[in-house]
Image: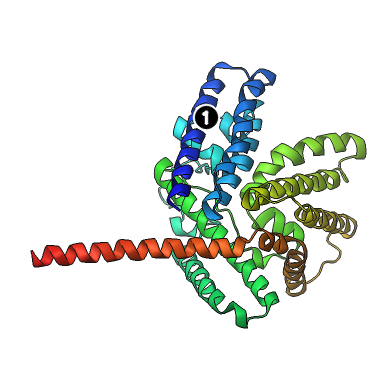
Amino acid sequence: MEGEINNFIKVWISVFISLCYCYGIGKIVPKGTPRLLTIVPVVCLFLALPLNLNSMHLGGTSAFFIAWLANFKLLMFAFGKGPLSDPSISLPQFAALACFPIKIKQDPPPNHNSEQKPPPRNFRKGHKSPLNYATKFLLLAGLIRVYDYSEYIHPKVILFLYCFHIYFALEIILAMVAALARTLLGSELEPQFNEPYLSTSLQDFWGRRWNMMVSRILRPTVYEPILGLSTRLLGRKWAPLPATFSTFVVSGIMHELIFYYLGRVKPTWEITWFFLLHGACLLIEIAIKKVVKDRWRLPRIISGPLTVVFVLSTGFWLFFPQLLRCNADARAFAEYAAVGAFVKNVGRNLTVKSLNATWV
């Protein structure tokens, strides 16, 4: 584990140096093809850097941040688009926005009416209380303990628990990144998840509740360019269909890349099929909504469970077997055990030192 941490530090030092270079390039090289040519070597480097990491948590999250988010944002930056193209941002903000799944919120203009007070900070839309994250952390810890008895639990139930494990782990990791960025940048940051288990449709799940930063990065890089092209070919009404499906195609390919970083095994393309299936079903959903408009819709009490069941069942079929194929569960548990042993060792050393100091 010590070697992995050293590699992790080296990788992120390389990332920061590369982003400093890109920040300088943005000041002297005009947007378009000239800037793209100067940034392509960094994009290639960011695709290679995750290969230096092998752990599930450090390697997996770093691959997501570097190879996917940072590269997509840098490609937008090359053409003067996206959050990195704001000329007012500082180098630390540039680096944070480039490689972390965050988006700095613009505070509303001050209201000079002294009688009207701003809403309390804790009740801003989309923000969750510390209790929410603490509850999910405790649930994640409980799940990890349940796995100790996995030989007594049906494999399908274990897969079901993995769904919540991935959701809790992702939300906690991204919340930690957001908290760190909030501390360093002093800015409000938009949340990444919005209770996806409350989704009432696939459009609601993928567009407004699940990993919203990915949606935000795919929209300007894939959805909007394809939308502009398909609008000229199909018209405004049906143009969103090929744009939406193209977004799922790219998302599937990028997930295959992330899974390769995790397992270093030849892809079977089942992950891509998972996203193609969801993309096709979402197209059907959008088409039906366009035809019936507001004349008829399923009650929330029916559409909600149907959406969750569909996401889980297709995940059991195509998504989670690929995690098991690269031994993600066993490797993750080994990492938890290593962290637990490290914490216990540090606590034991601190206790011994405090006792020695007391006796002296």
Crowd class of label 1 (few under 14; some 14 to 19; many from 20; radius 10 Å)? some
Is residue 59 positioned above or below 345 on the image? above
User: Which residue lies at the image location 67% right of the left edge and 71% below the top edge?
Assistant: 159
Side of 72 where 3 appears, left or right: left
Q: Is residue 120 visible?
A: no
Residue at the left extreme, as displayed: 360
Is residue 279 positioned above or below 313 on the image? above
Between 61 and 302, the one lying in front of the other is: 61
Numbered marks: total: 1
Between 314 and 356, the one lying in front of the other is: 356
User: Which residue lies at the image location 55% right of the left edge and 16% below the top edge?
Assistant: 28
Side of 87 where 40 appears, left or right: right
Side of 289 where 31 appears, left or right: left
Q: Determine the secondary structure under disc 1.
A: helix
Q: Position of residue 221 (x, y in %)?
A: 71, 37
Q: Kindly indicate the quadrant of the structure image that contains residue 85.
A: top right
**Quarter holding the C terminus?**
bottom left
Q: Position of residue 318 (x, y in %)?
A: 77, 62
Residue at the bottom extreme, as displayed: 152
User: Which residue lies at the image location 45% right of the left edge and 47% below the top edge?
Assistant: 3
Q: Position of residue 1 (x, y in %)?
A: 45, 53
Q: Is residue 99 visible?
A: yes
Q: Position of residue 197 (x, y in %)?
A: 65, 67
Query: Which residue has dot 1 on it?
Result: 18
